[in-house]
Amino acid sequence: MKNKYFVASLVLGMLLPVALAGAKSSEPMDEGQMMAAYMPHPPEKQFEKLGLNPEQKEKIKKIIEDNSSEMKKMHKDISEKMKAFREAYSDNKKTDEDLKIIHSEIEKNHGEIIAQHFNMMLKIRPILNEEQRKKFFENMKKGMKNHKHEKNKEE
């Protein structure tokens, strides 16, 4: 049970920057931004840290590229909904129910983004050997710690 929560925390920690980046901007993220948010380090550094061979790098790059247009659409949708929420929140004509509906749509979009990233992780998994998978999660843990540290600095 403990292991289940650990994996869920890692996945959410890895995806949180993606969700936050999409929510902060009214513009959808481009492929480079998505890749940077998806992995704790820029892709090239992530590849170096995992010791991927050129074939592995190409396969992973293709997976990310294949998901790029869908991810752009998802980020655009969530950005539009976040903008609508901000506008509705300050509009006295909007009811709490209106805000709840928009919030529910935003939550649904976040879930779709998390599912999409999880599916990409599943596609990447067989490309990596056991040691590379371990390093991948170690790097995500470090990325989560760094993200928490940076977030605490901002507050």
Image: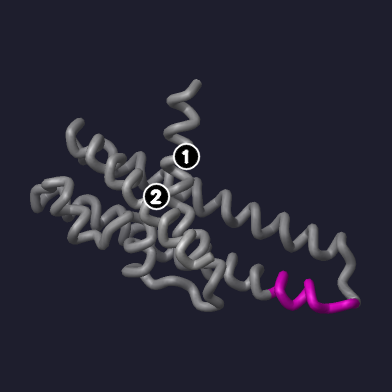
In which quarter of the view is residue 34 placed?
Answer: bottom left
Q: Nearer the viewer, residue 145 or 42?
A: 145
Q: Residue at x 49, y 46 (%)?
A: 115
Q: Mark 1 or mark 2: which is in front?
A: 2
Horizontal placement of 74 versus 139: left or right?
A: right
Residue visible at 51% across and 77% down?
27
Along the line of sight, which residue is nearer the eye, 24 or 123?
Answer: 24
Question: Real-space Cα distance between discs 1 and 2?
Answer: 9 Å
Image location (x, y in percent) of residue 131: 17, 33
Quadrant for the C terminus in the image? bottom right
In magenta, the rendered stretch is 84-92
Residue 22 lies, with reference to residue 3, above or below; the image says: below
Return the x and y of residue 65 as percentages of the image width and height. 31, 61
**Residue found farthest to the top:** 1
Disc on the earlier residue, 1 or 2: 1
Q: Is residue 150 magenta?
A: no
Q: Quadrant of residue 93?
A: bottom right
Query: Can you give x and y, in whole percent of width and height, for residue 86 in the image?
Result: 71, 74
Question: Callout 1, which amino acid?
Answer: Ser
Decide: few, some or many residues near mark 2? Use Cα within 10 Å; few <14, some 14-19, many ≥20: many
Magenta-drawn stretch, dominant element (helix, strand or loop): helix
| Other-residue count near label 1 (Cα within 10 Å), few / some / many at <14 / 14–19 / ≥20 | some
Determine whether 28 is above or below 103 in the image.
below
Give the labeled residue for mark 1.
9
Establish if 63 lies above or below 22. above
Instruction: Name the residue located 43 percent from the left edge and 34 percent from the top edge.
Output: 7
Query: x and y percent of residue 97 in the render?
Result: 86, 60
Task: Identify the residue position indicated by label 2 in the image.
Answer: 144
Circles 1 and 2: CB atoms closer than 8 Å = yes
Mark 2 residue type: Met
Q: Residue at x 33, y 61 (%)?
A: 35
